[in-house]
Image: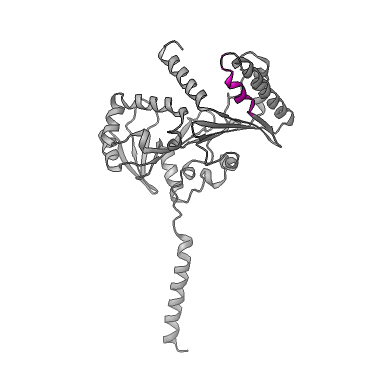
Amino acid sequence: MTRSRVAPRIALAVLLAAACAAPVRAVRRTEDPLALVPADATTVGVVRWSELRASPLASKVFDDVDHISGDGDAARFLEETGLTPREDIDTIVIAMSRGGAGSVESGVVVFEGRFDLARISSALTARGAARRSVASGEYFRLAEKGGDQPGAVALINKNLILCGSESSVAEALARKENGGEGGLSSGQGLGRHLSRVDRDASAWALVDVSRMPGVHREGGDGNEPSQALFGAMKSVSLVALQATVHGDSVEVAATGVSKDAEQRDLIADSLRGMLAMWRLAVSEKSPEMVSVIRRFEIDTDSDSVSIRGTLPGSFLRALSRSQHAASSGAPR
């Protein structure tokens, strides 16, 4: 083979190799909200706003949102952006992270829904927000208030908005660009415990109790099961919570993780005692609740204790009315 023929073939081989290698080097962007949450978060919660709209459980929440929406600058901001939280937000992801001793707790909030980015951008700029650029994207740095760490908002796309401290938002944008590396969905930190919740539930949360000093403390309402439960909770390292809407009722579940078998048994016994006391307390005023409480189940396994049951719509509506009466000062 002559040299004139060899050179083109070598060049072609090099080009083919580069083409094959290109996908490996391609940026692995992700817009999965959980991938934007740092793996070292101490708490993460997800609320599927769209599913809760039909539940009595959400009525008070939406009433509070409507109240905020009608208050001063918040109302003007919503009017300028065309945003209606009750209708335009589908899912909210909230995560908090705690650093070392003396450090400030930080957090991120991710909103999924439908957003007019141009109007939101204009409203933020009008309130003194400054556009900032980093290698992984852009965000708005909010005007500082007092000595607080400045907040930031990243308008990722028309269906996804990220809020939090400036450093938290910048780090989340970096995770978005690198495929979620260092994020919750990578299986690190709280991500190791995602299997403990139904991620399709209407709302769920994971709390790393072991990294939250001051959470374990003496408490309870003075009765023996309550005191025993608070004492046994000192051994719990993780709490998983979830709620799923079924029609006008809500199925709820809570799980506490503890390595101590004796403490797990104590937690289970204390929960059974509290359910028994609850049945006695409602037997006269709300006898229909007795059968509801009886159907709550308590289970233990090799490392956790769980309680689950279903709250009917009638109970949720009564609870909402009671809370509304208490907040307004009206007689129940």
Residue 321's spot in the image, x, y percent? 45, 19
* Identity of the residue furthest to the front in this view: 288
Q: Is residue 223 visible?
A: yes
* Residue 276 inside the magenta-drawn segment: no
From this viewpoint, which residue is outermost toward the right?
262
Q: Residue at x 46, y 46 (%)?
A: 32
User: In the image, what residue occupies the spot 57% across and 44% down?
Assistant: 188
Work out whether 13 lies above or below 117.
below
The image quadrant that residue 132 belongs to is: top left
Kindly give the residue lying farthest to the top in the view shown.
331
Q: In this view of the protein, which residue sits in the foreground, 150 or 192? A: 192
Horizontal side of residue 273 vs 285, given as left or right:
right
72 horizontally vs 274: left or right:
left
- Front residue of 243/73: it is 243
Q: Residue at x 43, y 77 (%)?
A: 12
Magenta span: 285-296
Q: Quadrant of residue 309?
A: top right
Render colour scheme: one colour
